Amino acid sequence: MKLDAWLLEILACPNCGGALRPDDPAGELVCTGTCGYAYPVRDDIPVLLVDEARTPAP
Ligand SMILES: [Zn+2]
């Protein structure tokens, strides 16, 4: 997974507005805000849709 640093800086969680942290092994962007959703990255394109997000395990 290759994401530019500048891209990560402007991206925010669409659910809570928190910053996103790349999780390379999982190929996901994980929200570091209040919701903790994990968004998939497909072909190096982050899919920042709440409907596509993986919610954290309870
Ligand atoms: Zn969030």
Image (cartoon, rainbow, N blue to C red):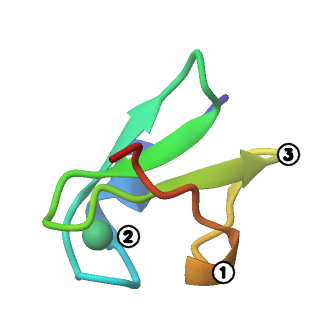
**Viewer-proximal residue among 56 and 53:** 56
Callout 1 touching callout 3 (CB < 8 Å): no
| Mark seen at residue 43 | 3
Q: CA distance from mark 1 to mark 2?
A: 17 Å
Residue extending furthest right?
43
Q: Nearer the viewer, mark 1 or mark 2?
A: 1
| Image coordinates for residue 21, horizontal then vertical, percent | 32, 42
Q: CA distance from mark 1 to mark 3?
A: 18 Å
**Viewer-proximal residue among 52 and 12:** 52
| Image coordinates for residue 45, horizontal then vertical, percent | 72, 57
- Rendered view: 34 above or below 39: below
Q: Is residue 17 left or right of residue 55?
A: left
| Image coordinates for residue 30, horizontal then vertical, percent | 39, 47
Identify the residue position indicated by label 2 in the image. 11
- Rendered view: 15 above or below 6: below
Identify the residue position indicated by label 1 in the image. 51
Q: Residue at x 42, y 36 (%)?
A: 22
